[in-house]
Amino acid sequence: MREIFDSTVERLFSDLVTPDAVLASESGRWPTALWKAVEESGFTLALAPESSGGAGAGWSDVCGVLRLAGRFNLPLPLAEAILANWLLCRCGLAAVGGPISFAPRAELCVEGGRVSGRAFEVPWGRSVDAVVALLPGEAPQLVLLAREGAGLECGANIASEPRDVLIFDAVTPLAQAPLPAGLPGDVLKLGGAMLRSAQIAGALEGVLAMAITYAGERVQFGKPIGSFQAIQHQIAVLSEHAAASVLAAEAAFAESGETLARLPVAAARICSAEAAGVGAAVAHAVHGAIGFTHEHALHLSTRRLWSWRSEFGSLTDWSQQLGRAVCLGGAGSLWPAITDGRLAALEEPLQ
């Protein structure tokens, strides 16, 4: 299944996700035809069971899809739709079609069965049909809220991807269910961190390919700059970070199933966030001045790297949490945690 997914998505994105299409979306234009093609491919429902119209795939099957979404700078909430529909199905609800996203942070309350409050930093919030959010409490509830009729405060990251605030005033949820056992109250933030680790890995693969190509084509002092040891060293550093982020993301997806593997996700998030900063800097150093121009495609990836590395918890946040958990567990728990993929002190939800 993984090979079919990857080859199908790569052909689709190669044909439709051009730099012009990405730039058009950054100007505020929703790519209707592109979304239709992605949705018709079935990947928004990839993790939903076949009984709900999905493919019944696992997280490891879609890691390549999300890496390709990152590599091509896909200007759509495909990653968000995959996570939202997975969580709906895990809660016993039906997956939904159309553009859908989720709120990593929300301040919501319920009165008389109606939901009021704010959902913050919703990816593509202004363009989706529905949003998944969590109602806080001792027994967190998952709610699916219609976007139509909600108030909107527009925001964006530095890649001009929408990150909006949605305001709900006594709305009736489209669906509601308690979180099942095994899913933490911060599952949306945890899942978002895992998604971004894969997208960053893919974007780094993209900028690495661009740097290698440019270094082989750009001639200085009579020979390609890729023949100079300083450039070779920089590209080697970029290659190391790209490979490490890919392996870390793949491990996190492989270890996740009906729940999300917190320790591998934390490791992938830390690795990818560090790699994003280093990788973007190296790519621009190799390209020189031309890499900073609007006409060159490099900035489409590097601006996303700079944005994604801080979403759903920054490098500092995740490093501090992992460091505290290791210290609390003591020396005797470190090696078992590495081999088992679990660290008891890290299993508490993110604060």
Image (cartoon, rainbow, N blue to C red):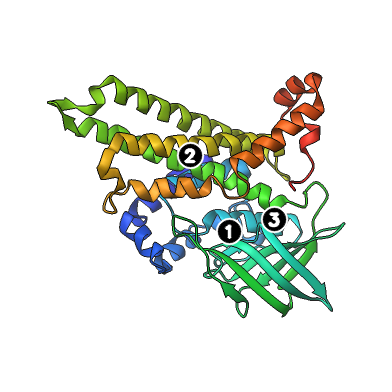
Q: Looking at the rendered structure, which numbered label has been put on residue 87?
A: 3
Q: Label 3, secondary structure: give it.
A: helix
Point out residue 289 in the picture as x, y percentages from the top left corner.
26, 42
- Viewed as shown, does residue 151 lie left or right of 159? right
- Viewed as shown, does residue 45 lie left or right of 111? left
**Mark 3 or mark 2, whichever is nearer to me:** 2
**Separation of residues labelled 3 and 2 (CA atoms):** 28 Å
Q: Looking at the rendered structure, which numbered label has been put on residue 81?
A: 1
Going by the numbered disc 2, the residue's amino acid type is Ala
Asked if residue 321 is positioned above or below residue 15 in the image, the reply reads above
Q: In this orientation, which residue lies closer to the viewer: 128 or 166? A: 166
Work out which quarter of the rendered image holds the N terminus and state it.
top right
Point out residue 188 in the picture as x, y percentages from the top left corner.
68, 53
**Separation of residues labelled 3 and 1 (CA atoms):** 10 Å
Going by the numbered disc 1, the residue's amino acid type is Ala
Q: Identify the residue at image location x=81%, y=27%.
A: 329
Quadrant of the rendered structure where residue 59 is?
top right
Going by the numbered disc 3, the residue's amino acid type is Leu
Q: Looking at the rendered structure, which numbered label has been put on residue 44?
A: none
Asked if residue 233 is positioned above or below residue 122 in the image, the reply reads above
**Separation of residues labelled 2 and 1 (CA atoms):** 23 Å
Asked if residue 129 is positioned above or below residue 48 in the image, the reply reads below
Q: Earlier in the sequence, mark 3 or mark 1?
A: 1
Q: In this orientation, which residue lies closer to the viewer: 211 or 34? A: 211
Q: Earlier in the sequence, mark 3 or mark 2?
A: 3
Q: Looking at the rendered structure, which numbered label has been put on residue 276?
A: 2
Point out residue 118 in the picture as x, y percentages from the top left corner.
68, 69
Whether residue 68 is visible: yes
Whether tag 3 and tag 2 are in contact, CB under 8 A, the answer is no
